[in-house]
Image: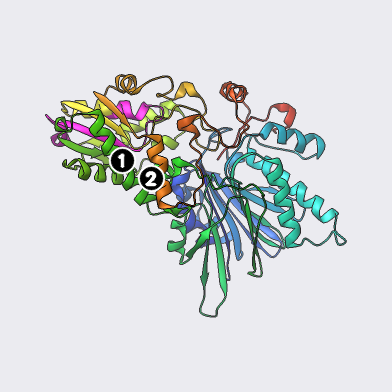
Amino acid sequence: MCGILGLVAHEPVNQLLYDGLQMLQHRGQDAAGIVTVEHDSFHMHKNVGMVRDVFRTRHMRDLTGHAGIAHVRYPTAGNAGSSAEAQPFYVSSPFGIVLAHNGNLTNTAELGESVCRRHLRHINTQSDSEVLLNVLAHELRVQVGRSDNPQRLEVGQIFNAVAEVQRQIRGAYAVVALIAGYGLLAFRDPYGIRPLVLGSRTDETGRTDYALASENVVFGSLGYRLERDVRPGEAVFVGFDGTLSSRLCHSAAKLSPCLFEYVYFARPDSVIDGVSVYQARCDMGVALAETVKRSLNPDEIDVVMPIPDTSRPSAMTLAQHLGKPYREGLIKNRYIGRTFIMPGQATRKKSVRQKLSAIASEFAGKNVLLVDDSIVRGTTSREIVEMVREAGAKKIFFASAAPEVRYPNVYGIDMPTSSELIAHGRNAAEIAREIGADACIFQDLDELKNLVRRLNPAIEGFDDSCFSGRYITGDVDEAYLAKLAQPAQSTGSSAPMTADAGLRVGGGDD
């Protein structure tokens, strides 16, 4: 679950890309990278860390050019702390291509075998994104090899190459890429699992600049306006001359976005696939309030409190719907990153007490209904319940705006094995005992899907796999999940990764 951004403008884009990445920092805090293009030369800087730490003035001076792409990384596999797996990735042939990817491929091993053995390409990391780049590069070479002028790449050939890439790869992906000498390419998987939006701005002379990003919150800060979502299976190409072209490259595309974007990952001020994330979270609170009424005696609840920040809209509307006071008793240290995104269980547990502190007077002697966006591993929830009890709460009820997370997510969210998920094999009462709460209440899955779809009836389905165990790409079975759960072979950050060295199944880093 990374953040990606691509720009073609009539001014230098280095500062625009940096500012845009700052707006996408919530999507990944492990690494950041920017590539710009000037004439036929790429300028790249990437490293581990937050955006503000990766880039210094000396780096920005070197990132010259009027087009570029950028990436913030959220690791789901691979070497989480390795700068080698920071994006964008680069290949020199054909023409020179750099690529950034949000998502996770589910047939990485198969693709790696084809890339390394059949196409004689070298994969240097454990990232599925580098595999994806090499598949794209190969298909572009095939397209130009079939033409009368193999030195020249046409827009139609680019779209043909994307169509062939989409035929081969499976999983979730939103991609931005630069092709040296030609322009900016972006495309989205046939289900639209990962978000991708198109924006534009027109200067005083009538020239139009274009941007593609994971979330439209980027656009306002850069002076762009949202044009539309990139459709599932669609490719968009912006030439360095400013011309925009697009084509639907998959015949069976079906809009089925990830439900977890609306629950947790996206910023509340984003609009994803025509749905206001803020409104969706407000509606989650109303629906959850009805479940609370069926599960608890509302008279037992003295106060409703959110676990900041993502759950605030849901908690506010839940409190209003129940007619209960809404208070903020947990204060967040804004200088600590998002706990769910942090790699490693020990790191997450340690960070909870650093991230949140309780106002004892708000809890003392009260029955408290805590509202969170979701319960995934349970580590954070358990620490929070313990903290609230120490602050003097009599009873603690814990409500989740999302259904129980019972199954691994293979499309780019760090939920790799069932054994890590507190809800797997447990009911609500058992989960409450595990986290130390008096009761747990979860959102109904069908109601969650219905309330999001009501905000955009054009949505045909959802990736709800972490709640339901249904994997919409159709290639994930028990054998796949069992292989995914096996401890991966450790590889040094400088060690090359080839197909026979064990490319991870679903081993994406996004």
Q: Which mark is residue 287?
A: 1
Residue 345 drawn at (x, y percent): 43, 26
In front here: 1 or 480? 480
- Residue 105, horizontal then vertical, whole percent: 62, 38
Which residue is outermost to the right? 148
- Give the quarter of the figure containing the C terminus: top right
Q: Residues within 10 Å of mark 1 (few under 14, many from 20)?
A: many
Q: Nearer the viewer, residue 425 or 112?
A: 425
Secondary structure of the residue carrying tag 2 is helix
Q: Residue furthest bottom?
A: 205
- Where is residue 333, by image quadrant? top left
Asked if residue 13 can be seen in this view, the reply is: no
Tell me the quarter of the picture where residue 291 sits.
Answer: top left
Relative to 4, does residue 504 appear above or below in the rendering?
A: above
**Nearer to me, 383 or 236:** 236
Residue 66, image x and y in percent?
A: 60, 66
> Looking at the image, can residue 469 be seen?
yes
Tag 1: residue type?
Ala
Please tell me which of labels 2 and 1 falls first in the chain: 1
Q: Quadrant of residue 124?
A: top right
Q: Give the label on residue 451, or none.
A: 2
Residue drawn at (48%, 66%) of the image? 224
User: What is the x, y in percent for residue 271?
Assistant: 43, 54
Magenta-highlighted residues: 359-384
Question: Is 247 situated left or right of 468 in this image?
Answer: right
Q: Check if residue 373 falls in the magenta segment.
A: yes
Residue ID at (40%, 23%): 422
Residue type at numbered disc 2:
Leu
In the rendered structure, the answer to whether residue 8 lies left or right of residue 158 reads left
In the picture shown, does residue 437 fall above or below 339?
above
